[in-house]
Image: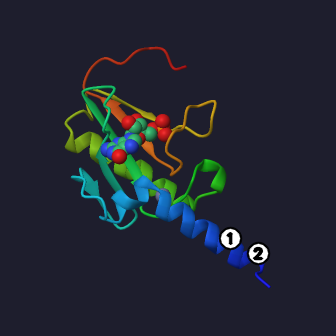
Amino acid sequence: MTDMKDMNDLKEMKDVNDCIFCNIASGEMDVPLVYEDELVVAFDDVSPQAPVHTLIVPKQHVASLNDDPDPALLAAVFGAAREVARLKGIADSGYRLVQNNGADAGQTVHHLHVHVLGGAELSVQMS
Ligand code: 5GP
Ligand code: ZN
């Protein structure tokens, strides 16, 4: 009999294989990286909504904040966002972090990520 753990392992394997950000983070999909460390990668959004629009993506597959990611992973994501802002030259001019979870927020890629937006004055509208 297949137990729940095996079922969860199988589901996670399927999620990871189907996941575009897992494919980018593993290097399987060749995308130029803006930043990389042990826990995260960063690359420019394919459909930028600001002069700087970079995504911070954990190497580990986590679908959303609801999946209770390790606090150390979240700290790494925020640290990487700060570093990307510095590398992109927008640390002082200002930047916005956006992180969408679920349908109402319009999350389209179900692998946790933070958008780093900047390089111009951004809309004051948040929703
Ligand atoms: P979400 O709406 O889930 O917060 O954001 C997903 C983001 O991923 C979107 O801004 C979209 O343009 C970006 N994106 C989706 N597929 C790819 C891809 O294959 N490569 C890159 N670089 N960005 C992607
Ligand atoms: Zn993934």
The image position of residue 97, as x and y in percent, is 43, 35
User: CB of mark 2 within 8 Å of CB of mark 1?
Assistant: yes
- Disc 2 crowd rating (10 Å Cα; few below 14, some 14-19, many 20+) is few
Q: Which of 89 and 51 is in front in this view?
A: 51
Query: Residue visible at 19% across and 36% down?
Result: 89
| Residue 39 point in image, percent of width and height | 40, 64
In 3D space, how far apart are the residues under numbered discs 2 and 1 (Cα atoms)?
A: 6 Å
Q: Quadrant of the N terminus?
A: bottom right
Q: Regarding mark 1 in the picture, which secondary structure is present there?
A: helix
Q: Which of 23 and 126 is in front in this view?
A: 23
Give the farthest residue toward the front.
1
Please provide percent x and percent y for residue 81. 36, 45
The vertical placement of 26 against 120, above or below, is below
Q: Is residue 2 left or right of residue 60?
A: right
Quarter of the image for residue 101 reads top right
Residue 72 relative to residue 89: left or right: right
Residue furthest toward the top? 124
Q: In the picture shown, does residue 88 fall above or below 43?
A: above
Could you tell me which residue is drawn at 32 percent across and 32 percent down? Answer: 47
- What residue did someone put label 2 on? 4
The kind of residue on which mark 2 rests is Met
Residue 81 visible from this viewpoint? no
Q: What secondary structure is found at the residue carrying circle 2?
A: helix
Q: Is residue 48 visible?
A: yes
x, y (%) of residue 53?
A: 31, 34
Residue bearing mark 1: 8
Q: Residue 94 carries which label?
A: none
| Residue occupying image coordinates x 31% and y 31% | 48
Quarter of the view holding residue 76: bottom left
Query: Label 1 sits on what residue type?
Result: Asn
